[in-house]
């Protein structure tokens, strides 16, 4: 049996894995997010996460739920800079980041300087960590691993409590 001469290999297909987001009644929840904190447009959210896939899943889930993601930061310094530029309504914050400073340090600066509060989405959910974050009035905690549906629900609850 003769095979045709080998040519260049086709490029590999893009592989993108996401966790589906399927809250019970997504449409009614989306209607609650259609206005931001100033009554104009969707609520603006900053994501601070150094794991690329988690950041992408988080952005996709929040966008699908009707929120406006203003950016994604991977370090505390980048988070503070983006928050000063974009003025998000709230921040979804990991604690362990790709920098010397952690998410609690960034949350403290955001709370003190900009009056922006955070939802902590992290694997670091111990009492000592919670105590360090307590002075910055966290809006909630999600222990990793978590579902995107639980993240969206917590963001919606936090938004409701702030309005």
Image: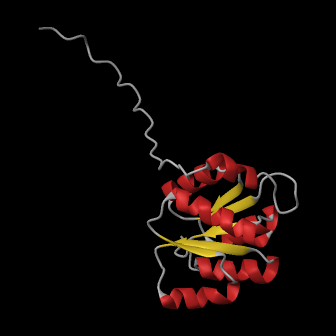
Location of the C terminus by quadrant is bottom right
| Residue nearest the viewer, comparing 104 with 3 | 104
Position in image of residue 96 (x %, y %): 52, 75
| Residue placed furthest toward the top | 1
Q: Is residue 93 left or right of residue 19?
A: right
Residue 108 picture quarter: bottom right
> Which x, y percent locates residue 5?
25, 13
Residue occupying image coordinates x 69% and y 83%: 137
Q: In the image, what residue occupies the spot 74% across and 50% down?
A: 31
Task: Report if residue 64 is visible in the image.
Answer: no
Q: Nearer the viewer, residue 27 or 3?
A: 27
96 versus 63 height, above or below: below
Q: Residue at x 80, y 80 (%)?
A: 113
Residue 22 location in percent, x, y?
53, 49
Q: Report the quarter where the N terminus lies.
A: top left
- Which image quadrant for residue 141? bottom right
Of residues 129 and 14, which is closer to you in this image? 129
The answer to whether residue 144 is left or right of residue 133 is left
Q: Residue 80: x, y in percent? A: 72, 72
In terms of image quadrants, where is residue 55? bottom right
């Amino acid at each position: 049996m003769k095979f045709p001469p080998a040519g260049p290999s086709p490029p590999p297909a893009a592989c993108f894995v996401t966790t589906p987001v399927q809250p019970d009644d997504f449409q009614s929840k989306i209607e609650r997010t259609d206005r931001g904190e100033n009554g104009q447009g969707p609520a603006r959210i900053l994501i601070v996460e150094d794991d690329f896939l988690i950041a992408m899943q988080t952005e996709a889930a929040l966008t699908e739920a009707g929120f406006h993601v203003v950016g994604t930061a991977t370090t505390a310094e980048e988070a503070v800079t983006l928050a000063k530029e974009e003025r998000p309504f709230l921040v979804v914050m990991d604690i362990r980041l790709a920098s010397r400073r952690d998410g609690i340090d960034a949350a403290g600066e955001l709370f003190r300087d900009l009056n922006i509060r955070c939802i902590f989405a992290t694997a670091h959910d111990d009492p000592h960590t919670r105590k360090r974050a307590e002075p910055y009035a966290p809006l909630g905690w999600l222990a990793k691993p978590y579902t995107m549906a639980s993240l969206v629900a917590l963001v919606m609850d936090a938004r409701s409590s702030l309005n």
